Amino acid sequence: MGTVYSIHVLLILLLGEIIMNPIVTSTIHGHTVGHASSILTESFTNVVADIVVGYEAEKLSGEDNYKRMVNIALSTGAYDKASYFDALLPGELEILEYRKAQGENVQTKTGKWKMSKVCSNSTYSSTKAVVGGALEAGVDLLDADGNIKGKSQLEKETKEAKPEKSADEKLATAYATFINIYGNCTENTQREYASLLKELADSVLRQDVAA
């Protein structure tokens, strides 16, 4: 009970921080993005790095970028989330090295890379999570005809393949996701996640009291 209550208090404080100190945003290419990282316009030889540029500069449609993300998994033989993320890592590090050279704050005080700074378009990280989650759950990325399944289809099949999470697990997952994307999303997205977290925390507290 004590641990859950502490998380609940932390979420309330976080909500207050969001309301009082909203992230500074600006409009680039018609989209509102945070100042956490700049829009990339460079050309990269690494496929993953080039995909990141595609998401940010909108060189390709969202569907094209999604298919390229899936093809990374297929071409490298990634079989679970960890191996897929490993396949993406060299390109992501190339992006971070570039951002660092441009004077952006992409490392912690201990020198650890801030992976949330790879792409300022959150669709990249969400696609990465969907493909990695599907692999982790053992869901095929291709349909019976050998075509790449759509993102929504992958999400649906992954959810069906996984056992239902407890309220505690849902809260922990949502909280970790929020912390990861907090500095790289719009104020509206921050508020939506904070609202979801509060609902989940309240649900855990109600279950705990009932027990």
Image: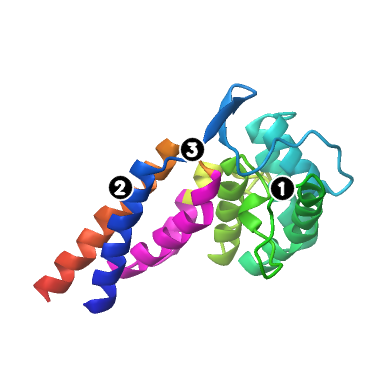
Q: CB of mark 3 within 8 Å of CB of mark 1?
A: no
Mark drawn on residue 104: 1
Q: Amino acid at mark 2?
A: Ser
Q: Earlier in the sequence, mark 2 or mark 3?
A: 3
What's drawn in magenta, residue-wise? Answer: 156-184
The quadrant holding residue 140 is bottom right
Label 3: which secondary element: loop
Q: Residue furthest left?
A: 210
Q: Earlier in the sequence, mark 3 or mark 1?
A: 1
Where does residue 96 sit, x and y in percent of width and height?
75, 53
**Residue 181 magenta:** yes
Q: Is residue 204 above or below residue 142?
A: below
Q: Main secondary structure of the magenta part?
A: helix
Q: x, y (%) of residue 184? A: 55, 45
Please state which of residues 152 and 12 is positioned toward the viewer in this rendering. Answer: 12
Q: Which residue is mark 2?
A: 195
Badge 2: how crowded within 10 Å, few (<14), some, or many (20+)? some
136 on left or right of 119 = left
Q: Left or right: 202 with respect to 145? A: left
* Secondary element at tag 1: loop
> Does 173 appear above or below 94?
below
Q: Is residue 154 visible?
A: no
**Amino acid under label 3?**
Thr
Amino acid type at mark 1: Glu
Query: Mark 3 and mark 1: span between their CA atoms?
Result: 19 Å
Circle 1 Cα neighbour tier, 10 Å, few/some/many (<14 / 14–19 / ≥20): some
User: Disc 3 marks which residue?
Assistant: 186
Q: Residue at x 51, y 36 (%)?
A: 24
- For the C terminus, give its image quadrant: bottom left
Viewed as shown, does residue 106 lie left or right of 33?
A: right
Is residue 38 something one can see in this rendering?
Answer: yes
